[in-house]
């Protein structure tokens, strides 16, 4: 999904001050030039007189302009205008990074919530499936390292040690269904058994203890 670009919100008077400073840096206004009075500035930027007054106050506090009652606003310093523009851009950049980080955290939270929902649905369906059909067998292949090679199921007390019931043994191309206690376990046999959730681990530990 396409992400909308987040816009950094700045007070209108700060934007106006930065715009005037930018015009000084671009030498549209030169040091010594007189620019608009507050009323003209308010009209040009479509803001109230109070907002225009605040913009000029910012520039005056930074010694970028000099405002004289009845004489308008005079450009005073190119260097300080450039410094203000740089600082303004840096603040915007930092705020943008903060907003993007918060936006990223929000997306991660939404993704984690979705993942949790999917996991819960999967677990729920698995549990329902097991309750409907609890006899789906587990399987484990026996290798030559098992100490019970060539010993019978009854001899090793398979059920007593694992609480799992062997329902089949596949040996090569043969499948022994419901093998009795006398069938032996051989290398490469695949044992099919049923039990609870811990059965696979118990059988594996038992066969290779």
Image (cartoon, rainbow, N blue to C red):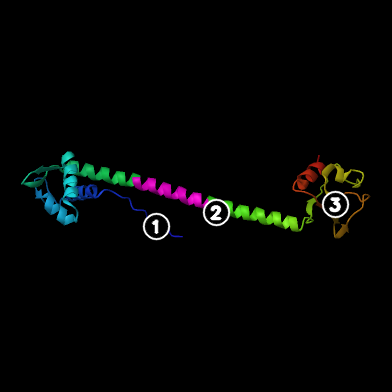
Mark 1 → mark 2, Cα distance in angstroms: 21 Å
Labelled disc at residue 180: none
Percent x, y for residue 135?
Answer: 79, 56
| Residue that badge 1 annotates | 4
Percent across and percent down for residue 140 are 79, 50
Q: Residue at x 14, y 42 (%)?
A: 77
Q: For label 1, count other residues whose C-alpha is less than 10 Å away and answer few (under 14), some (14-19) or many (20+).
A: few
- Where residue 9 sits: x, y (%)? 31, 50
**In this view, the mark in front (1 or 2):** 2
Q: Position of residue 74 (x, y in %)?
A: 10, 45
Relative horizontal placement of residue 15, taking residue 69 as reference (left or right): right
Mark toward the start of the polypeptide (1 vs 3)? 1
Residue located 78% across and 43% down the image: 202
Per the model, the C-alpha gap separating discs 3 and 2 is: 39 Å
Residue 146 appears in the picture as rendered: no
Magenta segment includes 145: no
Q: Which residue is mark 3?
A: 166
Residue sitting at x 42%, y 47%:
102
Which badge, 3 or 2, comes first in the chain's sequence? 2
Mark 2 lies on a secondary structure that is helix
Segment colored magenta: 95-111
Secondary element under disc 3, as helix, strand or loop, is strand
Do tag 1 and tag 3 residues touch (Cβ < 8 Å)?
A: no
Classed neighbour count for the residue bearing mark 3: other residues with Cα under 10 Å, few (<14), some (14–19), many (≥20): many
The quadrant the C terminus occupies is top right
Q: Nearer the viewer, mark 3 or mark 2?
A: 2
The mark that comes first in sequence, 1 or 2, is 1
Q: Quadrant of residue 64?
A: top left
Q: Nearer the viewer, residue 129 or 77?
A: 129
């Amino acid at each position: 999904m396409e992400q909308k670009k987040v816009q950094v919100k700045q007070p209108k008077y700060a934007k106006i001050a930065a715009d005037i400073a930018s015009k000084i840096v671009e030498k549209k206004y030169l040091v010594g030039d007189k620019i608009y009075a507050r009323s003209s500035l308010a009209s040009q930027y479509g803001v109230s007189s109070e907002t225009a007054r605040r913009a000029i106050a910012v520039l005056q506090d930074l010694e970028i302009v000099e405002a004289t009652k009845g004489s308008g606003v005079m450009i005073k310093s190119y260097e300080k205008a450039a410094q203000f523009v740089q600082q303004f851009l840096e603040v915007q950049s930092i705020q943008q990074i903060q907003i993007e980080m918060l936006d990223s955290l929000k997306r991660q939270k939404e993704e984690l919530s979705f993942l949790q929902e999917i996991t819960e649905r999967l677990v729920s369906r698995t549990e329902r499936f097991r309750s409907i059909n609890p006899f789906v067998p587990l399987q484990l292949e026996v290798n030559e390292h098992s100490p019970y090679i060539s010993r019978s199921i009854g001899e090793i007390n398979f059920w007593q040690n694992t609480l799992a019931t062997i329902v089949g043994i596949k040996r090569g191309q043969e499948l022994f269904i419901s093998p009795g206690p006398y069938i032996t376990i051989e290398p490469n046999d695949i044992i099919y058994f049923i039990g609870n959730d811990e059965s696979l681990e118990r059988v594996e530990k038992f066969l290779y203890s």
